Image: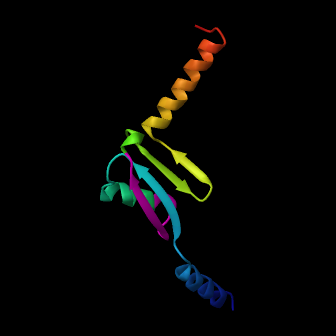
Amino acid sequence: MRSDRKHKRSKYKRRQKPEVISVVSAVELDDSTQNRIHELFGDNLRMEVTTDPEVIGGIEIRKRTELFDGTIAAQLKKLRHKLYNLKAYGRD
């Protein structure tokens, strides 16, 4: 009986719609990068890949409400914010 339930669950998993993730990169993603994303986020997913030279380098991945931002633009923005706070609070 239990193995029958397991079989039904595995059939259901195969029929689930793929999870959609949004990927933004400065350049087109090569196959190895796309394969690595599939390894990290699972096989049952569909990637919407966009190229945007404004990110400078790295990639940004959105999964539902989560954001994984490894872009150079985001790192520069964080650095700019830290430097501004140092100057604003007199920590030269």
Kindly identify the residue that appears in the image at 32 percent across and 56 percent down.
32
Numbered-mark total: 0
- Picture quarter containing residue 90? top right
**Magenta highlight on residue 48:** yes
**Magenta highlight on residue 3:** no
Q: State the quadrant of the C terminus.
A: top right
- Picture quarter containing residue 6? bottom right
Q: Which residues are magenta?
A: 39-52
Q: Which residue reaches farthest right? A: 1
Quick check: 80 left or right of 54?
A: right
Kindly identify the residue that appears in the image at 39 percent across and 47 percent down.
52
Kindly identify the residue that appears in the image at 39 percent across and 48 percent down.
25
Q: x, y percentage for residue 38?
A: 44, 62
Q: State the quadrant of the N terminus.
A: bottom right
Quick check: 66 left or right of 49?
A: right
Kindly identify the residue that appears in the image at 41 percent across and 58 percent down.
49
Q: x, y percentage for residue 53?
A: 36, 43
Q: x, y percentage for residue 79?
A: 52, 25
Quick check: 26 left or right of 5?
A: left
Q: x, y percentage for residue 31?
A: 31, 59
Of 84 and 3, the residue lying toward us: 84
* Above or below, 38 relative to 91: below
